[in-house]
Image (cartoon, grey):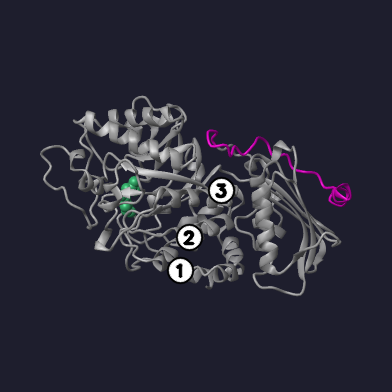
Amino acid sequence: MYKYILLIFSFSLVACGGSSGNSNSVPAQPSSAQISSQAVSSAAKQLALVPLPAQVVEQNGVLDLKTEVSLVADSSASTATQAITGLLNLVGINVVNSATTKIRLSIVNQPDLGNEGYRLVIADDISISAQTDAGLFYAVQTLKQLLPVAKQASYQLPRVEIIDIPQYAWRGSMVDVARHFFGIEYLKKHIERMAAFKLNKLHLHLSDDQGWRMEIKKYPKLTSVGGSTQAGGGPGGFYTQDELKDLVAFAAQHNIEIIPELDMPGHVQAAIASYNELACNNVTNLGLYIGLDVGFSALCLTKPEVIYPFVKDVLTEVASVFPSQYIHIGGDEIKHVLYPEFIDKANQIIKDLNRTMIGWEEASAGKNLAPDTLLQVWNDNYDIQSATDRNIHLILSPCSYFYLDHGNYNGQPETYTWCRRQGIPLERVYSFNPQKYSLVTGIEAPVWSEVVTSEAALDNRIWPRLAAVAEIAWTNQSARNYQEFTQRMKALKPYFDGAGIQYYAEPQLGW
Ligand code: TNX
């Protein structure tokens, strides 16, 4: 049967070049860039798919899918199998062995598809193939966008072949849970929503001046004291290590890796309030902080015998909870002669834990950065050349495009304006061209939460703009077009409503 499908769709595949390099240590290769943009047929643009797939070839007619299918899934495809089972359940399609329409999830050896690419063929059956469980999982996300959100008696699916490969290996969302605390249940919803748009990294900003949110067993006051408040003075909160392990497992079921950030050596007032000795002896401000300022607190860099055992102990527990290859050390907004030494020492501690360091762009001051270190660029015009000269790769989060704490529109209440006075409307986000940078591992959009005080506000800042971020990170730059993006997004409104997302009703989407 599989051969039969291949015969029906006997068009030639466009060569896709190298692997997309999803492996954590390997920067993305622009493999789908080599799929010519003409290969994205007008069919692709009519199908309401976000992010836009690399290649869509539509055949005539539809597959009339009844409420029974049989499912044949590769035994190593556990997340994709769970995803397809969940999707079928949602739309009321039963899995019955004797059903004539089959859904097949096959792991194949097809290097063109890289680590996250997939091929989805809708003909008399639905055949999905990929090199990995992750690739199959993404095909299921595509299928989900092709199906309606509500149950029907039958489903008309377009007969189509989609071959899809992400542009970048790192497609991220960052949530600041330190300035305002957001609970595990919200983060799980966020993971599900991220997955629907093929995002794969959730960066949690777990500590800052206003709160320390991760249980550290060796230093219980970090959470009992440091976690007890938040910006504006609410009750704060923290995650136990068991809760975080559960979240990590939930994320893995959605092909999402959680990247923990413990921000050091600045942004540490909550830690200092918990353990005063972490501050220099002349520091008098040793209390909890509920304001909005940045750049006033620091681990005492002239007390190495105090701070480095602390950093090592904390990061050792971080590594025991989070299996991610990367640990984010923060490193932003602090100036000190000993800062480069701190970065090098933190880098060594992380290396000794067999992990890789990420720092905000300022960490480029480190002299001995491991070659696989990643730096996260946040100021639009930051001179990062001292790092790229050393072949260090970048995560792009330039604030005037990707800081979702800025307004959806000029003048939106409770948003920041420091990076871009007029806010960052959807169209502005979408206009970002990652090809302006070299050595790009991927894209990530942070939401800082100093002035984001509720889950509704967080939803409003994230959606729909994070969908634009997802398309920038997944889809070849030359194939992207804002007008077409808005058309596809318009058609996806029922998904946003169905998921209960309290999005910003962006006028350009007719929402
Ligand atoms: C700068 S971006 C910061 C954060 C603030 C943010 C507000 C970065 C690495 N540091 O501490 O929350 O601006 O937009």
Dot 3 or dot 2: first in sequence order is: 3
- Label whose residue precedes the other's in the sequence (2 or 1): 2
**C-beta proximity under 8 Å, tags 2 and 1:** yes
Residue 3: say if magenta: yes
Query: Residue 12: horizontal and vertical position, in percent?
Result: 80, 44
| Dot 3 amino acid type | Ala
* Circle 1/circle 3 CB separation < 8 Å: no
- Residue 14 position by quadrant: top right
Query: For mark 3, does the 10 Å Cα neighbourhood hold few (<14), some (14 to 19), or many (20 or more) residues?
Result: some
Cα separation between marks 1 and 3 = 28 Å
Q: Is residue 185 above or below residue 23?
A: below
The residue to which callout 1 is attached is: 504
Q: Position of residue 434 (x, y in %)?
A: 50, 45
Q: CA separation, marks 3 and 2? A: 24 Å
Q: Residues within 10 Å of mark 1 (few under 14, many from 20)?
A: some
Residue 465: give its label. 2
In the rendered structure, which amino acid carries the disc numbered 1?
Tyr
Q: Looking at this view, is 256 or 76 the one in front? A: 76
What residue is disc 3 on? 252
